[in-house]
Image: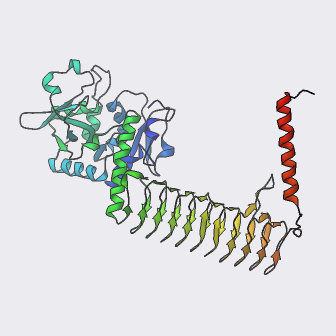
Amino acid sequence: MRSSLPKMMHPVCGRPMVAWPVAAARDAGAGRVAVIVSPQRDLADVLPEGIETVVQPEPDGTGGAVRAALPLIRDAETVVVVPGDHPLISGELLGELLAAHAEAKAAATVMSVELADPGAYGRLVRTGDGEVERIVETKHPENVPAEILAIREISTSTFAFDGPALAGALERLTNDNEAGEYYLGDVLPLLRADGARVAAYRCPDPAANLGINHRADLALAATEARRRILERHMLAGVTIVDPAAAWIDAQVEIEADTTIEPGSVLRGATRIGPGCTVGPHTTLIDSTLGAEASVVRSHLVEAQVGERCSVGPFAHLRPGAMLAAGAKAGTFVEIKNSNIGENTKVPHLSYVGDADVGDGANVGAGTVTANYDGFTKNRTKIGEGARIGVDTALVAPVEIGDGAYTGAGAVIREDVPAGALGVSRVDQRNIEGFAERKNAENVAQETDKAEEDETGGAA
């Protein structure tokens, strides 16, 4: 991966790579899920609650990894092994694997796929009657017979096992191969030697075998995962105008009759209610939209937008911004850590930070809450039905009472009582003839400059 971030922690559509097979295992009904980790890279911080980790002391192959979990395997009736770097495996496919495993009454069932170009994947070798005999690794194809390389059915490295049978085979596993590694697939001949049956479930989805080894693989997997996410939402009643221009993370929830316009990015734990319009060119990160809200060409992070609210274009709602039903945050408005009341309007060109704005208020263009005094953040309170004039600076801590007004251009440093008008300006004074005198000064300056250029500045 050429990265300081462990491979398994790289995100695929907003979810760490390793969390995808974990989610699939849970969807398939796993009672206990364990992730094999290296001593240097604990993945516990990115795993869901209740997931165990088991340390593999040294990187000695897939068999060595599974053998590190022997105490868990001995206690389990059925064990499913899934590669941590296969994010496109699903709970549905694992369920089908388990059903095939139970029907075959096998000690082991391998999930396989057939590929036109099997590449360096391990080939599934069958007996004359179609039973699974073994898996042949082809990382060093020069040492593999041509008839084996010609096989197109490959192992996905996903297995279902009888727990006690797997435990016994792992204890006899050797690393007598070109790579000097313990291959999990090598337990299959050991099980057959014990008289147990080894079966195969041929997976209908080749993407289940898509493992990630570098960032090109990561992009390929993310593209397919995104396609599936978009399809799921569209089948659930969401309109996505251009699926090629919408990026939606795995955990995002969208209710029916919402429209996602092109260029929209929905990330993290974002929740969108019914009948909303998002975009074009809108980013929502860990944010919530109520029913019939509209967010156009805006950027929201950890914000809560109530039903029927209007946001944008070009608005920025930062963490802690909370808009009650029917509120508006208009063009070039920034809101942070503030509560905006029902039907309150902040139409344009304003900054509202660390403020509580009552229901039905109107905040005029160019309003700024001066919330930071150089040491602490202070709050501004604007009462219900208040009217804040254009270009008002509210120097916190300060309170504007219910139904109060501020005059245009006011700098409000003291509380304004309910129903009062707060102003802070001197009377307007007009200076007659100013433009004529100013023009004359400009002409004189241009003449002096021209003469200086001609003489080269010499005295």
User: Where, quadrant-wise, is the N terminus in this rendering?
Assistant: top left
Q: In which quarter of the image is residue 125?
A: top left
Q: Position of residue 337 (x, y in %)?
A: 66, 61
Q: Residue at x 50, y 67 (%)?
A: 294
At 86% across and 43% down in the image, what residue appears?
445
Residue most extreme to the right: 459
358 or 80, which lies in front?
358
Q: In this view, does 178 lie to the left or right of 45?
A: left
Q: Is residue 307 above or below residue 191?
A: below
The figure's colour scheme reads rainbow
- Report x, y in % for residue 422: 82, 73
Is 102 in front, or is 315?
315
Number of numbered labels in the structure image: 0
Residue 441 seen in the figure = yes
The image quarter in which residue 424 lies: bottom right
Q: Is residue 419 above or below residue 52?
A: below
Residue at x-position 24% and y-position 25%: 138
Give the residue furthest to the left: 129
Question: Which part of the image, by quadrant, shows the C terminus?
Answer: top right
Asked if residue 30 shows in the view, the reply is: no
Position of residue 208 measured from the top left corner of the image (x, y, whole percent): 28, 44
Find residue 290 and report its horizontal and vertical position in percent: 50, 69
- In the depicted structure, whether residue 447 falls above or below residue 176: below
Relative side of 161 to 4, left or right:
left
